[in-house]
Amino acid sequence: MISSLVRTGLVTAAIFAAAGSALAQTTWVLPSAYPPANYHVQNLSQFASDVDAATNGALKIAVHPNASLFKAPDIKRAVQTGQAQAGEVLISLHENENPVFGIDVVPFLATSFEQSKKLWEASKPAIEKALDEQGLKLLYATPWPPQGIFTKKELNSVDDLAGLKWRAYNVGTARIAELVNAQPVTIQAAELPQALATGVVDGLMTSSATGVDSKIWESLTHYYDTQAWIPKNVVFVNKEAFEALDPAVQKAVIDAAAAAETRGFGLGVEKTAAYMDSLKQNGMQVVAPSEELKTGLAEVGAKLTEDWAAKAGDGGKAILDAYSKM
Ligand code: PCA
């Protein structure tokens, strides 16, 4: 009789222990659209392991790179609807939802990492608020290297872009195709290597990083270092998923995110030099744009700036004013 009670008690304790450990451990799925070797993804992995260490394994973040779970434009919605708990996106992919998401791709507004950081500080409250209204909590942002033009021919002016099969990744890069009489085709980074290999694309604006990630020298020959804008990836979490965490775990996430943002801006600076070297070592002609090309791009940029200002209205103007005073 006694021994059977003891046995029941032991079984019950074992069940509690199992339930306790199951309840105390949470796993977040975090899709990213960029390849594992890219510094954004490496930074995400470091963020996940910092959270793991700071919470003694109470929160695990499983990073799924390379658009393996969701395509780049679908990640944000997946997190909003709870199909994934957290995610990383190129925030300008969502400029159509709110112009503030496109502030970092206004050409020639913030072209150095230092300016990019200031523009982030000026725009962060509005971006954080816009995400919050969509059920998302902002964690951190990281810059891509400055954007230049890849082609397989020499460019003397913007007229030389006419007729190119122009890869676009967001609203602005598609609009550029329209302005220079190129043929826009929207392709996300995960599909870019194939699009280049099959000749679907023979011109694009992106970073040295994406050039290296896609082994762009296998198809194209020139890189014009126009430093036109610095787009950013933003990492966020579903608000309900965040609020379900223990306060101490929430704090660990916030602290690790702040560290990831600082590290990410540092990585941007450090890796850009290495990516540019890699392009050269692989035989690309890395060149500064001619004055004529620069003037033409400035005109294209001015049109995009007008488009953005018209959409962004007074809210956008307030951010630009704050940025200009920083
Ligand atoms: N690489 C990404 C976004 C911006 C960048 O530099 C891409 O080309 O898709």
Image (spheres, rainbow, N blue to C red):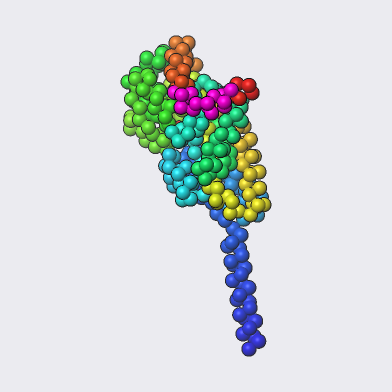
Part of the protein shown in magenta = 307-321
Front position in the image: 313 or 75: 313
Q: How many marks?
A: 0
Horizontally, residue 233 falls left or right of residue 150, namely right
Q: Position of residue 171 (x, y in %)?
A: 42, 29
Front position in the image: 137 or 163: 137
Q: Can residue 285 be seen in this view?
A: no
> Is-magenta flag for residue 69?
no
Q: Where is residue 31 in the image (x, y as percent from the top left)?
A: 49, 45
Q: Position of residue 203 (x, y in %)?
A: 38, 24
Location of the N terminus by quadrant is bottom right
Please tell me which residue is depicted at 46% across the width and 32% down the height of the picture.
95
* Residue 216 occupies quadrant: top left
Report the residue that reaches farthest toward the bottom.
1
Q: In this view, does 56 lie above or below 181?
A: below
Please tell me which residue is depicted at 55% across the width and 51% down the height of the picture.
241
Report the residue that reaches farthest toward the top.
292
Front position in the image: 264 or 278: 264
Location of the C terminus by quadrant is top right
Our reading of the magenta stretch's main secondary structure is helix
Q: Where is residue 91 in the image (x, y as percent from the top left)?
A: 50, 35
* Residue 205 occupies quadrant: top left
> Is-magenta flag for residue 317?
yes
Horizontally, residue 74 falls left or right of residue 322, namely left
Please tell me which residue is depicted at 39% across the width and 25% down the height of the picture.
175
